[in-house]
Amino acid sequence: MIYLDTRDPRPLYEQIVEKMTDLMVRGILKEDDPIPSVRSLATDLAINPNTVQRAYLELDRLGYIYSVKGKGSFVADIGRVRREKQQKLFAELSALTALAKASGIGEEDWIAAAKAGFSGEMNGGIHHD
């Protein structure tokens, strides 16, 4: 379910937060679905339970999960997670668009590259007519 990248410079708990929110946005984890216990996920990932606990505390602080005493933790409002992820991506897209313009990439090539990315045909090159 979750794979951590030991070469990623970010702390493991941040990677867990990102992976869990990705699972929520993609609909793999649905609203009110239970999430693995701290102990279970720590065992599966072969990491310290405190790291998982820290990730879960962050997910709870963000409002992405909620806990029920004696029952565990569950996925909260996925719509909110999705909206916040999309807002972040649109901000990144805006910054990339400005960089593309400054690098001389024209609007048509930029749009063509975006369409190729969606269709899975992205090859990293610039389209020329």
Image (cartoon, rainbow, N blue to C red):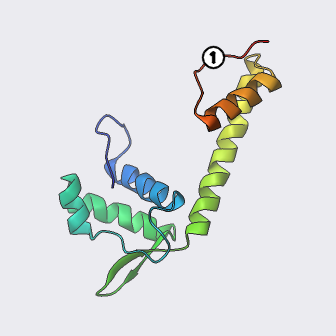
Q: Decide if residue 72 is on the left or right side of residue 47.
A: right
Tell me which residue sits at (38%, 42%) in the image: 10
Count all numbered tags in the image, as a single digit: 1
Q: Is residue 57 above or below residue 26?
A: below
Q: Nearer the viewer, residue 108 or 6?
A: 108
Q: Where is residue 72 in the image (x, y as percent from the top left)?
A: 32, 79
Q: Position of residue 113 (x, y in %)?
A: 69, 27
Q: Decide if residue 63 is on the left or right side of residue 49.
A: right
- Occupied quadrant, residue 69: bottom left
Q: Decide if residue 68 is on the left or right side of residue 38.
A: right
Q: Which residue lies furthest to the bottom in this view?
A: 70
Q: Is residue 67 above or below residue 13?
A: below
Q: State the SS at label 1.
A: loop
Tell me which residue sits at (58%, 21%) in the image: 123
Q: Where is residue 109 in the image (x, y as percent from the top left)?
A: 76, 22
Q: What residue type is labelled 1?
A: Gly
Q: Position of residue 87 (x, y in %)?
A: 67, 53
Tell me which residue sits at (63%, 38%) in the image: 118
Q: Decide if residue 88 is on the left or right side of residue 28.
A: right
Give the residue pinned by disc 1.
125
Tell me which residue sits at (21%, 66%) in the image: 40
- Occupied quadrant, residue 51: bottom left
Does the image show residue 31?
yes
- Occupied quadrant, residue 13: bottom left
